Amino acid sequence: MAGIFKAYDVRGLYPGQLNEELARRIGMGFGHLVDLTGDQGAERPRTVVVSRDMRSHSVPLSEALCDGLTAAGLDVLDIGLATTPMNYFATGRLGTAGGIQVTASHNGAGYNGLKFSLAGAVPVSGDDGIPIIEEDALGPEPKPAAAPGQVETTSVEAAYAEHVLSFLDRSFEAADGPKLRLAADAANGMGTIYRPLLEACGVELLPLYFELDGTFPNHEANPLLPENLRDLSDLVIEQKADLGVSFDGDGDRAAFVDEHGEPIGSDLITALIAGQMLERESGGTVIHDIRSSRAVPEYIREHGGTPLPERVGHSFVKATMRRTGALFGGELAGHYYFRQNYCADSSILAVVAVLNLIRRSGKSLSEITAPLRRYAKSSEINFEVEDKDAAMAALVDRYATRQGGALDRLDGIRIDFDDWWFNVRPSNTEPLLRLVLEASTPEQLAARQAELTAQLGEPT
């Protein structure tokens, strides 16, 4: 059981690893966490937002979770079927003690899980909070509260729609000319419920796999994998769409393709959105993950901003945004974080931002992206390595110590040279090292990738 308590959430196979009894115990453990971290004043919130994805077993798991939360003395606001960003929004807007989304995100149909946040949509992670929940869930059962909480059902859809559409540039609504054609792939996941919002953005929506189905009959709900973007790219080309977007299973990540069906790296999307925001707030800080192209911090500086690299993981990005007052942040995995959204990630807000950018510029998405395509960059490449520390130490010795590359240990190792760089970081849960590299030319990228592969072994 202990293996399901991850760095950022709880996730495992249902019912072998995660079942109703464990979900109930997790609810009681979350109550303990709220008691330890909440304001100790008399008026401190004692309500938790609970929501779920479309998997059939999310219903009994959600009910069991609510049983545990109320046994711990917490009241529950059950908002039903929702995306994870909607849970974050409800937690922040309603001023609750926290929120829990029942979801396994992009994992297959046999999996389920839980994502947690505390007051203000502050994330709960393996470094801060999840070990407390784990200890209560797997140890002696916590003592129930003297006065159990109550469950109330409610909806935040109207409030969330108002919030999202407040980011939309309305000045183009009365403009003559055809609407932008937006192809969107919900992958049968929770992005499906964004349909009214997408249509309200004034686009001609071309929906793909917009039927809720937790078995994911068409493809895995993971937009990071190129094979999961093929159907979207084909639709964009066939229907002459202006752009395409693909959502993951719980609707918190988005990947974009341009009008030619070509995928756009999420780091470049981060830069584009940041540049747009910096027009209104020059000098603002923008967070980007350490794997981002060099073009990203360059572009942010060119637009009057201050780029700040951060290690991979939503809890790190959100904490740094709060500490620095950053206006925006983005990760290579397709998470986009907005200060005016409780520093939480929202895929639908990223879509709105990209639509605003296309309309304001009057250019195609490929034209807008072209100035950022300054370097040749790899995707993330995985290597199965038993002794990860030894492998990274060997890379440091070869490239930093002997060749004089600039070493950064923010997340794994990143070693920079004038005309190329690479980052290798260990997986939190698997015997894997993950490599990303970038070079000045495609030829140099291929040569350096072959060189690193020879040292790390065959990719998985």
Image (cartoon, helix red, strand yellow):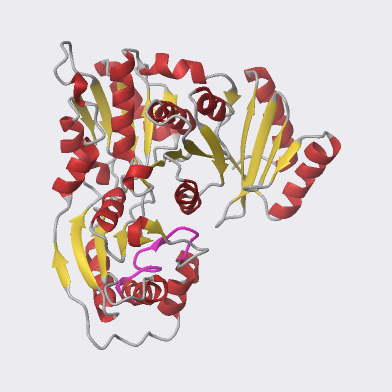
Q: At 47% across and 40% down in the image, what residue appears?
A: 331
- Residue nearest the observer in this picture, 456 or 364: 364
Coordinates of residue 162 in the picture (x, y in percent) = 17, 41
Q: Is residue 325 left or right of residue 99?
A: right
Q: Tally the marks.
A: 0
Which quadrant is the C terminus positioned in? top right
From what the image shows, is residue 124 above or below residue 24? above
Q: At 42% across and 39% down in the image, what residue appears?
A: 328
- Residue nearest the observer in this picture, 97 or 385: 97
Which secondary structure type mostly characterizes the magenta part of the structure?
loop
Indicate whether residue 228 is drawn in magenta: no
- Residue 221 seen anywhere in this rendered image of the structure: no
Coordinates of residue 358 in the picture (x, y in percent) = 32, 19
Task: Give the magenta-colored segment's residue range.
Answer: 5-21
Q: At 13% across and 59% down in the image, what residue appears?
A: 154
Coordinates of residue 436 in the picture (x, y in percent) = 60, 36
- Residue nearest the observer in this picture, 228 or 45: 45
- Residue nearest the observer in this picture, 107 or 274: 274
Q: Is residue 335 left or right of residue 86?
A: right
From what the image shows, is residue 268 above or below residue 408? above
From what the image shows, is residue 432 above or below residue 435? below
Indicate whether residue 12 is drawn in magenta: yes
Q: At 30% across and 37% down in the image, what residue appears?
A: 349
Q: Is residue 64 left or right of residue 126?
A: left
Which residue is situated farthest in the top direction here?
A: 177
Q: Is residue 447 left or right of residue 170?
A: right
Coordinates of residue 100 in the picture (x, y in percent) = 31, 62
